[in-house]
Amino acid sequence: MLAASQSFVAQVSTEAFLTDFFYIFATMGAFIGLLALILLDGSLVQPKNLVDTFVQKLTSAFVGGVAVLIAGYGIWNWQFDQAYGVPDAFRQSLSDWWILGPNMRTFAQNVDPKVLAGADAQQIFNVFFFAFAALIGAFIHGMGIERLKPIACYIMSALAGGVLMPFLAYLTWGPVGPLTNLGLHDFVGCFGLYMNVGVLSLILAWRLGPRIGSEGGFNITLLAAGAVLLMIAIPIFVIGCGYFEPGVGYFGISNTSSGLGIVFSNVFVALSGGALAGAVIAYQKHNPLYIFFGPIAGYIACTASLDIAAPWQCFVLGLVGPFVMLLGGTVMTRLKIDDQKIVPLALGPSILGALAAGVIGSGLPTGGMPGLTGHYAFQHAHISLGMQVIGTLVTLGCSGVAGLTVVLIIEKTIGLRVDRATEQAGLDHEFWTPGSPLPVALPAESAVHEAL
């Protein structure tokens, strides 16, 4: 039962409700991004695996999201309890913010602002984290598409979305985390989301091995729909990575001074730079996939600096992103690792973006919280290339160790991959009842066999 007691007017002011709807809007953008990922992967699988791709990806997404409700949001909020000197900060944060905790069982108007200011917005931000963990789950499925066992996929989605991503966000995303409070800068999850999934995908695709008969063509309609939908979703959820201070301005998640107009402009010029570079590569390679993935690579290359860069800087980074993606795809081919999507798109461009933010934002004040002094004073730290390098190495190390450990344990116990007969027959045939009213597959609309 939800708790109801004394009412605090400040928690339900018009200003508070405007903030609430701002984060609701951003959260729904992340869920639109999830739909886009479902369409994108559906476009790249063989028809005999289409239904399972949709089902397993959506299930993985919700498994990751529910894991955040159990522990993930509390892990991220740990940094704030530390900054404000809460005793036994880690345990207290987990206790307060899991799905049965007091902060998730009390109406905002019944929460003392001295205890939890902006309670509605913070409860909604929990769902924002849910949505990003859902994206992690969807990415996990995409890492082993057409061959990963469902149970292995769901275990990894829960751990990656509910534990690893929030822990990396605690370190690298937020104003008073251990690294961000020292000057590390991020804005849209360059470290905890994109770099993290790039490393995990490299490990999982390596251990799974190549798909059997993965040259089945792609569905250009689903691909175009997914890519355009993702480009619509990105500007919507990106703005939720900052906050408004009425009468003062808009700040990035690291408490770096910014502006909503510049952030919104930066997203579109990053996508534009990636689109132009992707088109050049597409014509050179005679492969239309690059024009669809180029804008995404351009955006990822800017994720760490969208709140501090000038539009021309994001345009340049956006132009470079697809070429880094091309290099990553070439490396995957030479290593014979079956991942021409997530690793090339996420790993190289995110590393580029993390380092570029250290150059673009060098010396800018960041970190800390308003009203605090000393080690956690507002904007006491400064962005530097050195801290961006440290953040990159920490993220690569944490993701690599955690990912390899989990993957090897699953591989040696329940197994990672479906058996060969199931893979050859198709996952739809194995897991979904023949004769179902649902369509088993959509016909491929193109016979293009070349991956990125």
Image (cartoon, helix red, strand yellow):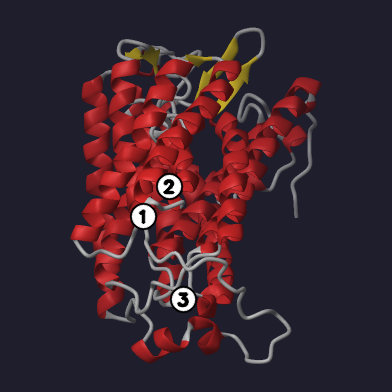
Rendered position, 224 above or below 300 = below
| Residue tagged 3 | 150
Q: Residues within 10 Å of mark 3 (few under 14, many from 20)?
A: many
Q: Earlier in the sequence, mark 1 or mark 2?
A: 2
- The answer to whether marks 1 and 2 mark residues whose Cβ atoms lie closer than 8 Å is yes
Q: Residue furthest top?
A: 247
Q: Quadrant of the N terminus?
A: bottom right
Q: CA distance from mark 3 to mark 2?
A: 29 Å
| Residue 61 rendering spot, x and y as whole percentages | 54, 60
Q: Say which residue appears at 62% left-offset and 52% top-offset.
A: 225
Q: Is residue 270 left or right of residue 349?
A: right
Rendered position, 244 above or below 229 = above
Q: Mark 3 or mark 2: which is in front? A: 2
| Residue tagged 1 | 452
| Nearer to me, 321 or 384 | 321
Can you tell which mark lies on residue 218? none
